[in-house]
Image (cartoon, rainbow, N blue to C red):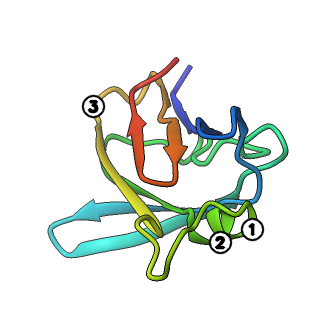
Amino acid sequence: MTGYLTTHVLDTARGCPAEGIEIVLSRIDAEGRHPVAKSRTNADGRTDVPILTVAEFATGCYELVFRVGDYLRRNGQAGCEPQFLDEIPIRFGVNDAGAHYHVPLLLSPFGYSTYRGS
């Protein structure tokens, strides 16, 4: 079996999944950033399908950009403009094309964290 890439977003300030966040995945190489996929989180804070499927999965450097600004505004968490967080880039490497890479985002209006999940 070859690998694939998934994510989800949890709103730690509200204690719930973050629905409706646009996510853009790009592959990074010497020539720059190359968008390869776009998705949006569902009611469970996940994408409906893997961001990269088994057929598309390859080793290399990638960047997920979570466009959280509109989500924070919709939920009354944005504060003053310009808000503290609008887009959150997470750059990571894939060195095992046979593995499942899960890159979640734990979000609050003034901070975030991520990790390699399972």
Which badge, 3 or 1, comes first in the chain's sequence? 1
Asked where in the image residue 16 lies, by quadrant, the reply is top right
Q: Going 66% across and 41% down the picture, which residue do you hit?
A: 50
Q: Going 38% across and 72% down the picture, which residue do you hit?
A: 34
Tell me the distance, in whole angstroms, between the alpha carbons under discs 1 and 2: 6 Å
- Which residue bears the numbered disc 1? 74
Q: Tell me the tag on residue 95.
A: 3
Where disc 2 sits, the SS reads helix
Q: Mark 2: which amino acid?
A: Asp
Q: Is residue 45 above or below residue 74?
A: above
* Mark 1 vs 2: CB contact within 8 A: yes
Q: Mark 1: which amino acid?
A: Arg
**Camera-side residue of 106 and 75:** 75
Residue 96 on image: x %, y % = 34, 26
Asked where in the image residue 112 lies, by quadrant, the reply is top left
Q: Residues within 10 Å of mark 1 (few under 14, many from 20)?
A: few
In the image as oriented, which residue stretches furthest toward the left? 30
Where disc 3 sits, the SS reads loop
Q: Quarter of the image containing the N terminus? A: top right
- Which residue bears the numbered disc 2? 70
Tell me the distance, in whole angstroms, between the alpha carbons under discs 3 and 1: 37 Å
Residue 85, visible in the rendered structure: yes
The number of callouts visible is 3
Residue 26 on image: x %, y % = 42, 63
Residue 36 on image: x %, y % = 51, 65
Which badge, 3 or 2, comes first in the chain's sequence? 2
